[in-house]
Image (spheres, grey):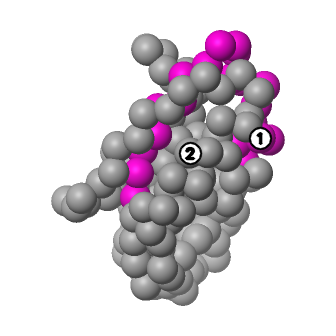
Amino acid sequence: MDDVDRALIAELQRDATQAYATLGKAVGLSAGAAHDRVRKLRERGVIRRTTVDVDPTALGRGVLAFVMVDSSAWMGDATESFAAVPEIQEAHIIAGTASVLVKVRTATTEQLQDVLRRLYTIEGVSGTQATVVLETFFERPVRAD
């Protein structure tokens, strides 16, 4: 990946809806060359997907929590069980005192409590520790530079 690819990624992260002509102009390429490079970045898996960043509160998901999940067994095989809980946005196998870290968004703390109950139904889960976010200062994408 060269500096042009990095510049393309930065531009796409800023605004993924821009036309290839605009994108190319921003990084010194023609529209066709920009399109070709973006296609190759997708094929190589550098660009995994294009999405829309939506305000969770506007969708009724204003409660954000990070939950540390303790287990009595290896949780690396429980991917489908965690993915089956729609309120979980992310799940990570981690090193440390817990086995899994999940990012959960719900409308209310009562719904968060329900998610915690459902986590206990996953085989091997022995405990949870939830941290509710009061305010998010910022979130940022991974930078290409």
Q: Relative to 4, say whether 59 is above or below.
A: below
Under mark 2, the amino acid is: Leu
Does 64 sit left or right of 81 as displayed?
Answer: left
Residue 37 in view (yes/no)? no
User: 70 and 120: which one is in front?
Assistant: 120
Q: Which label lies toward us, 1 or 2?
A: 2
Q: Which residue is mark 2?
A: 116
Q: Which mark is residue 81?
A: 1
Q: Identify residue type, mark 1.
A: Ser
- Which secondary structure, mark 1? helix
Q: Which residues are magenta?
A: 64-83
Image x and y of residue 111, in percent: 53, 62
Horizontal and vertical percent for residue 116? 56, 45
Q: Report, in whole angstroms, how far the alpha carbon at label 1 lies from the one at label 2.
A: 13 Å
In the image, 143: left or right of 37?
left
The quadrant where residue 89 appears: bottom right
Q: State the residue at coordinates (30%, 54%).
A: 133
Q: Is residue 14 magenta?
A: no
Q: Residue at x 61, y 45 (%)?
A: 117
